[in-house]
Image (cartoon, rainbow, N blue to C red):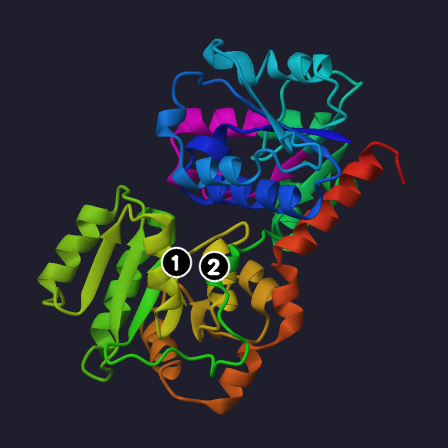
Amino acid sequence: MKIGFDAKRFFFNHSGLGNYSRRLIESLLKYHPEHEYVLYVDRLDALDKAHPEALRILKRYVHNRSDGSDLYTLVMVDGPKWWRTWGMGKRAAMDGVDVFHGLSNELPWDLPASVAGVCTIHDVIFKEFPAYYPWLDRLIYDLKTKKAVQKAGKLVMTSEATQRQVEKYYPGAKKRSSVIYQAVDPEFYVSESSNGWHVSSSPYFVYQSSFTDRKNHAALVEAFALIHRQTHWNLTMIGLNGPTLSVVKKQIEQLGLSDRIVCLVDQSREEMIACVTGAAGFVYPSLNEGFGIPLAESLAANLPMAVSNIPVFRELVEDLPVYFHPNNAQEMAAAMLQITLDDEQVRQRLLRPSLKKKISDENTAQQCVELYQKVCNRV
């Protein structure tokens, strides 16, 4: 099969959508080199601004076939801004693409019937929590998602929770959707023979997330303030800069916790991985997620977890974490204290292989290839 991708976020997005695109495409290149892959991007002169992980993947899989050819073709078009919506579909057909996979809630509107369409829907949080988004963004997201649901032969949902939410706003989507969890970068995995907990003279909770309202950093700071005298663990919050960063920093200063709470902003992927894998525990107070890749990464790293009691987290990691209501700082604080206890039962639960299989890159790649074959009527 020849499989095409809208690679804009593969190259230029530094948050969850970009990480999903890079992880999936690399997994396919690694485990299914029998297929051809075409990456479409419309920023011909901007690859010097691309995410370094995207460039690393391209370099790794160049000249990888037995005949010395590449596993992928990079198609760069110096076209108008709307080319991804109207133009990329026809180009994919001209290139002989069998399946076109839209990786982030959208497909080209001009994708002809001769090319099978697959689209990943990550979430519809713009519907669930409209106050977090400007009205124009909500309008655009809704239009693109609606078009993708109508046009795709198959839909990929990143969780059953997302599948239910999408069906709520776009009836009929569930009939054509499959749940395929996001894969985790292998660099997050620690040895299964390790004790599962990270011994450090300066242990810390880690929260990996962009600084936005939905990620609920202020409540986490409030919770930590309630227990900072009861634990020697510190708190590290790491993620992309966002609208709540300045408010959170001011809150930390006012509480006199600048020596206990660290905000690391816009770190490299290597620094992010080192920060997560070096933590003593993970806390995730987010109000709503379509999947929650930081949770999956912390599962891979064998971190004890205190997380929001929301459906998608219970679906992904079941009984591993200590759960709390994300709007209850006292409940959150108690959960954080609980995971500081050196509990052998917790250690053993963290090693559960059935949960980690959900987020393996090999498993994700295999499920996607099987879906591509189905939508092409090849099985």
Disc 2 secondary structure class: helix
Mark yes or no: residue 280 visible: yes
**Whether label 2 touches label 1, CB < 8 Å:** yes
Q: Is residue 277 above or below residue 269?
A: below
Q: Identify the residue under disc 2.
A: 187
Amino acid on which disc 2 is placed:
Glu
Q: Does residue 117 appear to the left or right of 322 in the view shown?
A: right
Q: Quadrant of the C terminus?
A: top right
Q: Identify the residue under disc 1.
A: 273
Which corner quadrant of the image does residue 15 belong to? top left
278 or 374, nearer to the observer: 278
Give the residue drawn at x 45%, y 89%.
343
Q: Position of residue 145 (x, y in %)?
A: 60, 30
27 or 150, nearer to the observer: 27
Q: Is residue 144 above or below residue 29?
A: above
100 or 176, nearer to the observer: 100
Q: Position of residue 198 (x, y in %)?
A: 38, 77
Q: Does residue 379 appear to the left or right of 276 in the view shown?
A: right
Distance in Å between CA atoms under marks 2 and 1: 7 Å
Magenta span dominant secondary structure: helix
Asked if residue 106 is among those painted magenta in the image, a careful observer would answer no
Disc 1 secondary structure class: helix
Give the residue drawn at x 57%, y 38%.
61
Q: Which residues are magenta?
A: 119-144
Q: Around disc 2, counting alpha carbons within 10 Å, would you say few (fewer than 14), some (14 to 19), or many (20 or more)? A: few
